[in-house]
Image (cartoon, grey):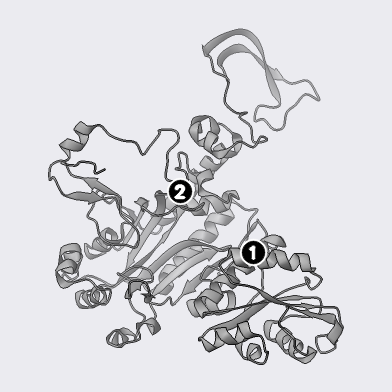
Amino acid sequence: EWVLQVQGTVQRRPPGSENPAMATGTVEVIPHAATILNSSLTPPFYITDDVEVDESLRLRYRYLDLRRPKMYRNLVLRHKVVKYIRDFLDAREFLEIETPILIKSTPEGARDFLVPSRMQKGSFYALPQSPQQLKQLLMVSGVERYFQIARCFRDEDLRADRQPEFTQLDLEMSFADEEDILQLTEELYTGLVESLTPEKTLVKPFPRLTYDEAMERYGSDKPDLRFGMEMADATDLALETEFRVFHSVIQAGGIVKGFAVKGQGHYTGSNMRELEQAAKDAGAAGLSHLRLGQASSIEALEEEAVQLSPGLRMPVEWSRRMAQRVGAGPGDLILLMAGPAKQANLWLSAMRTYMGERLGLGDPNAMTFAFITEFPLFEWDEEHQRWHSSHHPFTSPATGEEDLLDGEDLSRIKSKAYDLVCNGAELASGSIRIHRRELQEKIFTILGYPKEEIVARFGHILEAFEYGAPPHGGIAPGIDRLVAMLAGSSSIREVIAFPKTQTGADLLFGSPAPVAPDQLRELGLGLLE
């Protein structure tokens, strides 16, 4: 890794000595003089794609890790993605406008990162979780089409696809309806994928599912559509059994639901124990199954060709009806779960993902996009006994459902919110926004904010709505996650130049770190033991 300056004659390499892996692999330099510009310590790991290196060591020496060809390719891809987005939106008369990083703390679903003010002791800025209110204020100001490659900050628990600071495309349009935004988003993603990663395959137009459809068929609002295994409710068939687990769950208001796994009816007892453990790892109490043997058709399936979970002692005619319910055929495996509807969907979705990965059903070159629409406007928080916004409090109720805000069952109210999902991950989230003060105040009241707090936290945007705010909406695609998917990486840390660890630590700079007592005193702060 020494840095040398070499002077010499460039000539073509002898036949047979070419190196196609190098851009200069067909030529060589016959040196006349060489100068050492800088020496190098022995690197802590081999700088090559062929050697696996512990991620913590890579992050500690990130400047060396970024020399690896794969990491450099990821940075180039990220640059091209952002450039494509800018060119695409500029051609459609969007204005790129920067919004402040130091703003006011307002609730948007996660904890804020707070920045103390030296000039106004006891007061704090917050780093934006998103430019949500700022872009809405731009719509009020007369900017009809806005975008920004925005830095966002959320103090939340981290996962492989989360960072405390991340980058998103922030996009907003005045006088636009949901269809306008979905069409624009589909055009953007289609062109981007086809231009930058032509080896990827797409399904066009993007499928659309309502939230209820997605939960019913896949148990998830971000289903991986690269494979089937659609779910079906089998509560009525479960009631015909004498299986006490099914009956106790159903009597408590729960459901029994399942799906078919094609061609896996040959699974052994050992295989089934592995699946049962996977179900428990997902949080479920258990997993029931039917293993179907071979036959010319489901109707021809014989008693001895069916193996049921312990406790399921049912005639073959019941197994045939269960197979028809979930779309199974001879030689297939049927997986069933029982529980409250929300949990059963969650567990089954985890099992569906597990089986897809176990069987290698997800083509890594397939980009299976889908729009999920008509999300609930509210979700009930059982722990705190209050309503929360499913997306955020600025999301508009669905057309014709405003009157339901005065009712008791707010869970039935749909919203004008939508997500773009791909291969089991959420890539973008957006909505048509509220643009009238009285409706926005009503939403805040339902969410439990006292009137004084509404004015203190949101008075600026409520006042702006009284000055002719136009109807508007937008969407916010995540850049990090998109680039990771295009690069074939399971972690967004692979496509960020200087990422944090899963605990939020920067191993290169050693942050977060203590600060000097004098710095705290200047801010009027002190540390409590």
Crowd tier of the residue under label 1, counting other residues whose Cα lies within 10 Å: few below 14, some 14–19, many 20 or above: some
Q: Image quadrant for the C terminus? A: top left
Give the residue at mark 1: 278
Among the two numbered marks 1 and 2 on one chain, the one whose residue lies closer to the N terminus: 2
Viewer-proximal residue among 302 and 59: 302
Q: Where, by quadrant of the figure, is residue 468 drawn?
A: bottom left
Q: Please report the residue visible at 53 percent of the width from the left and 83 percent of the height from the top.
A: 254
Mark 1 or 2: the one toward you: 1
Locate residue 391, reporting x and y percent: 38, 69
Q: Please report the residue visible at 58 percent of the width from the left and 49 percent of the height from the top.
A: 489
Relative vertical location of residue 497 with respect to residue 383 in this rendering, above or below? above
Q: Please report the residue visible at 35 percent of the width from the left and 57 percent of the height from the top.
A: 94
Q: Is residue 519 visible?
A: yes
Q: Is residue 196 visible?
A: no
Locate residue 148, reporting x and y percent: 35, 53
Q: Secondary structure at mark 2?
A: helix
Give the residue at mark 2: 82
